[in-house]
Image (tube, rainbow, N blue to C red):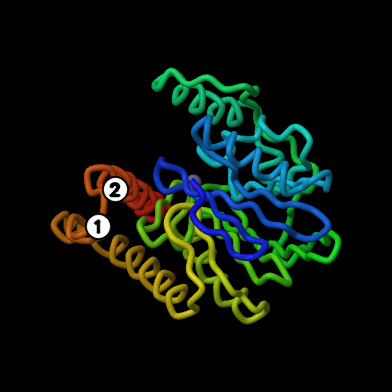
Amino acid sequence: MMKLKEGPLTLFESALYKTMSAVIDLGDAILLVDPCWLPHEVEQIRLYADVLAGGRKKYVLFTHSDYDHIIGYGAFPDAEVIASAALADKREEERETILEQIRGFEDSYYLERDYEIAYPAVQHKVERDGQTLQLGGARLTFYLSPGHNDDGMYTVVEPLGLLLAGDYWSDIEFPYIYHSSSLYEESIGKLDTMLAAHAITRLIPGHGDSTTEVAEMKRRQTADFAYIAAMRKAVKEGDQAAIDALIDGCPFPRNLRKFHRGNQELFERELRVGEDG
Ligand SMILES: [Zn+2]
């Protein structure tokens, strides 16, 4: 459903996991971000973007390759795709794993779509921090954000001042770490780099509410650093009670507990590797 419309920015929130899709009018072109994820939701975003574009060029940006974020790709065959080089160059078997997750999801709910499920073909690859892409009067500046998974990136859209965060700085989720906790810390540290280099007016996470307040952006960053530090310490000490207590009071506990458990296992693996090496 449409969650927010403010000037050139329109946000759509999926009924699933409060996943955020954005449609941004850049003036000379239209930028879509992670259009997802139920069939009618993708269709609503497509229709909205088509009317808004009115013949102007469309770009689809993927914040990372998690299956829920790329599931809408096939609905935009007329758009050019922007993503990290790590997403673009993903090995065939890893692509297949992600596509298989989508197929599994479709089968679970008997979903049918009027487009093909496919892995994104990327025309604009992001290789490094500070890389830019000029689209008419708008400039996108990218920062790589590995940690949550291995191919994330942040995008700052100027002159609007939007920060497209992908799966970082959610107000509902603690850090979901599938790839590396130290890279995750490095990536969330880049909030300070971006706040210093750009006039950020709104941070838009992949799940949950966006915020216009710098204090709230910093609060989320601090909470995420604290969660990681506390988890690492408790795992090292083998303190299960402290680990369990880390997510006391979190929303949707029956689901978030699973991700918390997944994080614990990742920290345990990292600890073992650290001790071996
Ligand atoms: Zn994700």
Q: Is residue 234 left or right of residue 83?
A: left
Residue at point 65%, 22% (across, down)? 116
Mark earlier in primary sequence (1, 2): 1
Query: Mark 2 = which residue?
Result: 256
Closer to the camera, 74 or 175? 74
Q: CA distance from mark 1 to mark 2?
A: 8 Å
Residue at point 47%, 73% (across, down)? 217
Q: Position of residue 54 (x, y in %)?
A: 79, 45
Badge 1 amino acid: Cys
Residue at point 49%, 33% (across, down)? 38
Q: Reply above or below: 116 against 263.
A: above
Query: Mark 1 = which residue?
Result: 250
Q: Position of residue 86 (x, y in %)?
A: 67, 45
Does the CB distance between marks 1 and 2 fall below 8 Å? yes
| SS at circle 1 | loop
Residue placed furthest toward the right: 136
Q: Reply above or below: 141 against 11.
A: below
Badge 2 amino acid: Leu
Disc 2 within 8 angstroms of ligand 1 (CB): no
Q: Position of residue 53 (x, y in %)?
A: 76, 47
Residue at point 29%, 48% (across, down)? 256
Residue placed furthest toward the left: 241
Query: For residue 143, what is the image quadrant?
Result: bottom right
- Mark 2: few, some, or many residues within 10 Å (few <14, many ≥20)? some
Disc 1 within 8 angstroms of ligand 1 (CB): no
Query: For residue 265, what is the image quadrant?
Result: top left
Q: Position of residue 211 (x, y in %)?
A: 48, 69
- Mark 1: few, some, or many residues within 10 Å (few <14, many ≥20)? few
